[in-house]
Image (cartoon, rainbow, N blue to C red):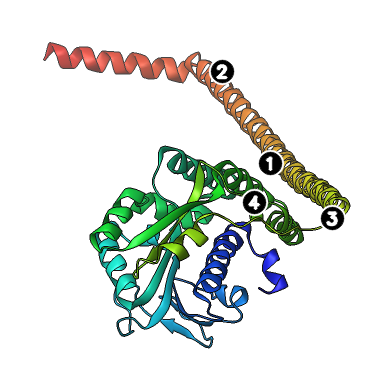
Amino acid sequence: MKAEVYSLPFDQFQRYFDLNRCLEALKQKAKVKSLNLLDVGGYPGLIFDFLTNDNVTVLDVKPLDKPNYVRGDACSMPFKDGSFNVVTALDVFEHIVPEKRELFLEELERVAKDYIILGGPFSSDEVNLAEKIVFEFATKVLGEDFASNHPLKEHLDNGLPRASFLAEKIKEKGHEFVAFDSGQLYNWLLMNLVKHFIFTIPESESLHKMLDNFYNQHLSPKDYGVPSYRTFFVISKNRDNQVLEAIKAPQKPKEGLSETLYKLQLLHLYFTLFELEAKRELQVQKKYSIHLESLIGQKENLINQKELDLRELQVGLQKMQAELGHKEKHLHDLQTHADNLETSLNRIRQTFPYKLYKTVSRNKKQEQKSK
């Protein structure tokens, strides 16, 4: 197992760590040095870094340019019957749509010569709730786009398989198997919530690796208990109970770092988290300040525009007032002219010619009436 695997995401490390433990026990009991093994759904080939002394092939639907990597369908694999001593499928079963799960198991059984190791989450009230909590948390803190591509979405869409279904299918084939718990559920839930929270902190890649490294070295080797997040089924087609019993109980974990180094690493982890959280707060404040300055600038521009509009209105009002003054003067002049005309008319009415005209006009009218 390569040293760099300790920096892998804790959930990926844990499944391959337990697989490596199973295979070491199997090889020791079977007295073989290496195995011909197929890892189904093993993109991007992490197993190569764990099993450095075995002949490993990886099959997955995703493309990858890597030696011993085969692109193919797990429900219709391009291999002959019994092509591999061991066939593994880790955290894959739950991603198979329910109507194809039995076919998937048939294919694993077909290409495996001796052993099948299948590990992953199985349906229970506790596991189902824990996955929903993580998915909802991811949606809230990281957004709908992030959650739409989250691996747990397919778990929730498909529904987790039941362990009883798998056990029944194994018995129908007449094979022996052992099952063991992997990854204490509460630790899995806490680690996922913490890691999804860290995703919200800028420049937190190093913190992710530190947290994973810390868990993988100190907690993963002894992270067994009920309820567990993942269950491993180790199936023997040859009904070799002695090998299965050797695999069943986790071996006593090897000593990790010294207690002093353990505490220093944990302290470093805390300080890094505090430092990144402080950076995040500064970034939030900076974004808020920029946003506030932008709003103030917008308000100032709006006020300036309103002042400009007001000045234009005032100029327009002054023009209207001046025009109204001109019209009032013109009206006054017309009224004066009308008064003058009325005065002149009254004078004309008092003259002898006008009176003579009026008298002649009345006489003519009377004569016309008498005729």
Q: Secondary structure at mark 1?
A: helix
> Closer to us: mark 1 or mark 3?
3
Q: Mark 4 highlights which residue? A: 222
Badge 4 amino acid: Lys
For disc 3, the neighbor class at 10 Å (few under 14, some 14 to 19, many from 20) is few
Q: Mark 3 highlights which residue? A: 258
Going from the N terminus, do you reach mark 4 or mark 2 first?
4
Measured in 3D between alpha carbons, the distance from the residue under mark 2 to the one under mark 3, in whole angstroms, is 126 Å
Q: Position of residue 358 (x, y in %)?
A: 36, 16
53 or 50: which is nearer to us?
53
Q: Position of residue 132 (x, y in %)?
A: 47, 43
Q: Quadrant of the C terminus?
A: top left
- In the picture, measured across the screen, residue 123 lies left or right of residue 135, that is left
Badge 2 amino acid: Thr
Question: Cβ–Cβ below 8 Å for labels 4 and 2?
Answer: no
Q: Which mark is residue 343?
A: 2
361 or 48: which is nearer to us?
48
Going from the N terminus, do you reach mark 1 or mark 2 first?
1
Residue at image x 41%, y 81%? 71
Q: Secondary structure at mark 2?
A: helix
Badge 3 amino acid: Ser
> Closer to us: mark 1 or mark 4?
4
Q: Which mark is residue 151?
A: none
Going from the N terminus, do you reach mark 4 or mark 3 first?
4
Q: Secondary structure at mark 3?
A: loop
- In the picture, measured across the screen, residue 288 lies left or right of residue 237, that is right
Q: Quadrant of residue 92?
A: bottom left
Measured in 3D between alpha carbons, the distance from the residue under mark 4 to the one under mark 2, in whole angstroms, is 123 Å
Going from the N terminus, do you reach mark 2 or mark 3 first?
3
Whether residue 162 is visible, yes or no, is no
